Image (spheres, helix red, strand yellow):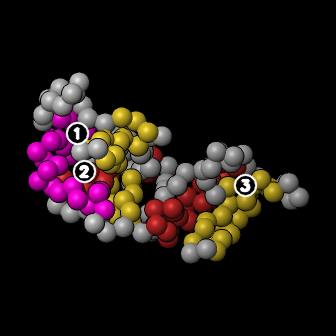
């Protein structure tokens, strides 16, 4: 059994309190320089990490264990893509493929929109959607914004809950 799986819900609740409304953990006990009642965790590339019994854990995985009493079967996905948003309503189980679909634009993306790229040979912005290892062509457009809007419209038609949409598309997106 891995050290991660060795942590139980009971042990977690002995050490930490989780607020499902805010997604934050606070310490129930004082340990070293950490005082009871203080916020638990540190930021690691957008994720909140919490060390328990010498093992580092992602806060969203601890939230799942705290609420559901079990470790997730596979991966966990942040619904709106905010790694630090650990409210239980914003976390869901996902396969690796589903989790990868809920990504934003890559850092090297020139359009600023996921799935939209410039076609210099044609002088147009192309919108595409990746699905099961294949690319679905949405269309070519005069502006990146038009391509983005068309891509979002197609994503909504596809009704894939794991596809990332702009934050304004979510009714419970954090401010």
Front label number (1 vs 3): 1
Does the CB distance between marks 2 and 3 fall below 8 Å? no
Which image quadrant is residue 52 in? Answer: top left
- State which tag comes first along the sequence, 1 or 2: 1
Q: Is residue 95 magenta?
A: no
- From the viewer's perspective, tell me whether residue 112 is left or right of residue 47: right
Q: Which residues are magenta?
A: 2-27
Judge the density around disc 1: few (<14), some (14-19), many (≥20) Cα neighbours within 10 Å.
Answer: many
What is the CA distance from the residue labelled 2 to the residue labelled 3?
Answer: 37 Å
Can residue 35 be seen here? yes
Q: Secondary structure under badge 3?
A: strand
Q: Which of the pair 98/41 is nearer the observer?
A: 41
Residue to which mark 1 is pinned = 25
Q: Residue at x 60, y 50 (%)?
A: 105
Q: Which of the pair 120/53 is nearer the observer?
A: 53
Residue to which mark 2 is pinned = 63
Residue 175 screen position, x and y as percent: 37, 36
Q: Residue at x 12, y 36 (%)?
A: 28
What is the CA distance from the residue labelled 1 to the residue labelled 2?
Answer: 8 Å
């Amino acid at each position: 059994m891995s050290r991660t799986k060795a942590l139980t819900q009971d042990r977690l609740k002995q050490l930490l309190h989780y607020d499902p409304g805010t997604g934050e953990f606070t310490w129930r006990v004082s340990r070293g320089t950490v005082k009871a009642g203080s916020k638990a965790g540190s930021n690691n590339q957008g994720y909140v990490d919490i060390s328990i019994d010498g093992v580092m854990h992602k806060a969203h995985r601890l939230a799942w264990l705290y609420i559901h009493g079990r470790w997730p079967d596979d991966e966990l996905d942040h619904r709106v893509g905010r790694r630090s948003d650990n409210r239980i309503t914003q976390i869901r189980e996902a396969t690796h493929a589903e989790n990868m679909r809920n990504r934003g634009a890559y850092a090297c993306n020139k359009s600023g929109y996921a799935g939209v790229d410039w076609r210099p040979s044609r002088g147009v912005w192309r919108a595409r959607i990746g699905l099961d290892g294949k690319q679905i062509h949405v269309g070519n457009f005069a502006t990146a914004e038009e391509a983005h809007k068309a891509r979002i419209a197609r994503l909504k038609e596809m009704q894939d809950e794991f596809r990332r949409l702009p934050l304004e598309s979510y009714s419970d997106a954090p401010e």
